[in-house]
Image (cartoon, helix red, strand yellow):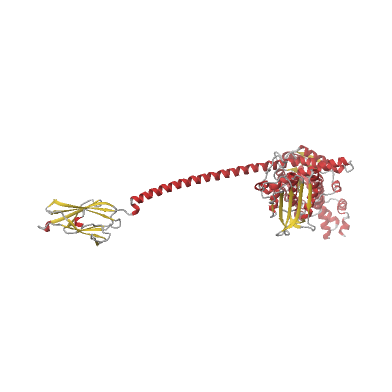
Amino acid sequence: MPAPVFTDMWIYNERVKPSDKESPLEQSITLTNRIELKSTQNFISFKIASLSYSNPSKHRLKYKLEGFDKEWNYLPANSRISYSNLNHGRYVLKVMSYSENNESAGQMTELEIIIHPPFYLSVWAYIVYVLLVVTGGYYLLHYLARRNVQRNEKLMERYKQEKEKEMYDSKINFFTNVAHEIRTPLTLIKAPLENLQAHLQSAGKEVKESLDIMSLNVERLLFLTNQLLDFRKIESNKYKLKKERCNVVDIVRGVYVRFQPTAKSSGKTLELHLPDKPLEAYVDTEAITKIVSNLFTNAIKYSDRHISVELSTGRDHTFCLVVRNDGEVIQPEKREEIFAAFSRLNQNAATGTGIGLAFARSLAHLHGGTLAMGDSEVENVFVLTIPLGAAPEVPVENKPEEAPDSLIDRVDESRAILVVEDNAEMRLFIEKQLYKQGYKVYSASNGAEALQVLAGQDIDLIITDLMMPEVDGITLLKKVKTDLMYCHIPVIILSAKTAVADKIEGLESGADAYIDKPFSMQYLLANVATLIRNRQRLREALSNTSANSVARNEGLSKMDKEFLTRLDEIVQANYSNPDFAMDDIVEAMNMSRSSFYRKLKGGLNLSINDYVRLQRLKRAAELLKEGKYNVTEICYMVGFSSPSYFSKCFHKQYGVLPKDYEG
């Protein structure tokens, strides 16, 4: 049986001829053994014919597309074969003709079919892909390496900044702690120096000049320590400006007068140019004084022979202070560096802390102003610009005034004061000054010892430091103010901690006064005298008021109010009982006899018998005003056993006899 032949070919059901444009056939399909197709020509059909004409009804065909079919497919002779969606690759279409009586005896025809892949799957495409992957991988690795380097650089920069910040903070903390420590010895210099100056008014000129020099240098030390502590406040955003209306001309002139002798002794000329008219601004006077003082100090320290200071009204509602000096000109690239804390361009030029200009600029910024160096190349020019400002809407702070010496001298000499201070020299000095005023003085080196003294002595006032070993000042203060036995005792805090937050903590814990170190001894004595006197007046007022008035008295602590209110209730319930005694009151108050006596004596300066008698007399006065009873009836109603004794006590308390009070 002859082999079958391909007679026709279709692509997407369109007949393909060799003469067609872009036809895959170069000659008739019958004569073709191999065809190549595009990736889009994957829907193909072929017509197959058997060329045997003897007994055609018994002829059969079978076909198989190698690379696609796994088994032979059967079809009648002269039939059509179709395949769709063929993938790219090499196929061999095999067609065999055979007789239905003998399937193995047939002839086979083969057609090789090549379907080319699409461009994106071609060899060139894969070459491009490989190149892209290699290039992308290279750039990715380069990017990752660069990012890693940048990340490491950032980490190193952050680490460097943290180390610089840590070093900066350690410097600030060190100097701050030193400044706190300096305040106590400064007090021991300043206070005795004030005493010497007060008692040596008639001393010779040489002695007086020596004392003045000592005083000037003490003030200078105090200025430096306060400046360092203020700088710390600014760094922690705790520094608050207290703006007020002032004449800037007067501030600058005052600083000039203070620095003129220093400049003269250094052989330098200090020129001052001020406006003819007052220059008023709403600023913090103390802060502006500190800025100007630092600029003067810097100019005198680093100038050669000449300093010039000029104050004028600037643009945009500001005032401008220009300070020039003829010292070594600072290079332009270093003119910002000098405003950094602890920065000194020439380590051997002059001594100093290195925070003056940084502190001055911080204060200028707090005012909304600027402090910078000018562009001059022949001299150093510092330019301060501050807004004139507007009136601040804040209440005026009332500052306590120092009492005159005569006020201190009139205090009852029997009052006992407890001084709690861990510095032995400071404690001894305060004790001596209090002894001179006639006070009875007890001392302790920390809060724990102070509590032991309180347990054994009747104390009228406590003076305590804050920072002490074992039990500090705040802990002692809280224990005193929350203990019924001691809550009536006034407390004065002496401390080198000058921050507003520390003062608020002390006052909120119950302190009656907070005094900074170094302090004026006269100011301390005035506070002592005033607090003791106010306590005495409070006692007198309580002795002449009713229980309801006691509950409303703002000068008493909550515990004192509760104590006196409870005591009044017990006494009022037993007015008419002549046998009512101290033991009955002590039992009702749930206190020991000694503790009750000390509390009543400390709070009202009365014994229990005096207190009960006073309450009975106050009740008698109320009954006499009502006019419902006669004197004798009232005498027995309030617990007196003798009308004559009642009249004597009433006359002593109110200055008149009961019958006259009644009338």
Q: Position of residue 260 (x, y in %)?
A: 80, 47
Image side of residue 361 versus residue 201, left or right:
left
Q: Residue furthest left?
A: 54
Quadrant where the C terminus is found in the figure = bottom right
The quarter holding residue 157 reads top right
Q: Position of residue 515 (x, y in %)?
A: 76, 46
Residues 379 and 514: in front is 379
Between residues 510 and 81, which one lies in front from this camera angle? 81
The image shows residue 121, relative to residue 465, as above or below, that is: below
Report if residue 408 is visible in the image: yes
Q: Is residue 611 left or right of residue 153?
A: right
Instruction: Determine the image quadrant of residue 228.
Output: top right
Q: Position of residue 187 (x, y in %)?
A: 78, 42
Task: Single out the residue that lies furthest toward the front.
Answer: 378
Residue 605 in the image: state x and y as whole percent: 81, 47
- Can residue 458 be seen from the camera position used here? no
Residue positioned most to the bottom: 14
